[in-house]
Amino acid sequence: MNSIRLHAGNHSFSHLNYADTPLEVFENDIIKGEVITREILKQKHQALTYFRFPYNSLGNDSTTHQQIRSFLTQNGYTVAPFTIESEDWMFNALYEDALKTKNVEKAHQLGQNYVAFTLLLFDYFEKLCLDRFGRNIKQIFRWEPDQKKRKALLQAEPENTILHAEYDQLTKRAGKN
Ligand SMILES: [Zn+2]
């Protein structure tokens, strides 16, 4: 990973599972999700290009997938690729549960574990690439920081710097090599 570039994309408005959602409803949710993402990207002088399916759920079959693909292409979207992901949703669920029960120590431990696990995967996939291709490739780390939740957590516990620390450690490691 020679350089690190953070890029935000549309991940829909209400995080519906496409496999359980009628096409039209899902399309409307994508359009609704554009508003905030476009605004954030505008501030960084970037255009909205990427869409990622919630739960990576691409549809029930190739027909329904093709329908949404056409919609995405017509609206200028590329489906966001990634090579590394470290189950942030799972750590997040446990993390929130720990905070709800005011178990700050456990929350802190979970944050540390998440970082350690992610760093392990960075190493693993880089090594895998070297073994298979004899060189490094640009890795794409899929990460879903929930800004709204994050803000609420930090407001509730302003002294809680775990989230900031995680971000710093990961971006530092991703920029290495
Ligand atoms: Zn998601």
Image: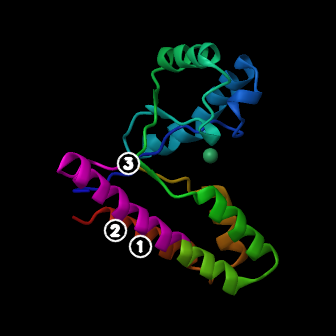
Q: CA distance from mark 2 to mark 1?
A: 6 Å
Looking at the image, which residue is at 65% across and 25% down?
Answer: 59
Looking at the image, which residue is at 63% across and 39% down?
Answer: 54
Identify the main secondary structure in magenta. helix
For disc 2, the marked residue is 173
Kind of residue indicated by mark 1? Gln
| Residue situated furthest front in the rendering | 131
Q: Is mark 1 within 8 Å of ligand 1?
A: no
What's the magenta region? 114-139
| Residue situated furthest right in the rendering | 101
Q: Which is nearer the N-term, disc 2 or disc 3? A: 3
Judge left or right: residue 97 versus residue 40: right
Tell me the tag on residue 140. Answer: 3
Q: In the picture, which quadrant includes the C terminus?
A: bottom left
Looking at the image, which residue is at 63% across and 29% down?
Answer: 30
For disc 1, the marked residue is 169
Q: Which residue occupies the foreground of this view, 170 or 41? A: 170
Q: CA distance from mark 3 to mark 1?
A: 16 Å
| Residue situated furthest bottom in the rendering | 105
The reply to whether callout 2 and callout 1 are in contact (CB within 8 Å) is: yes
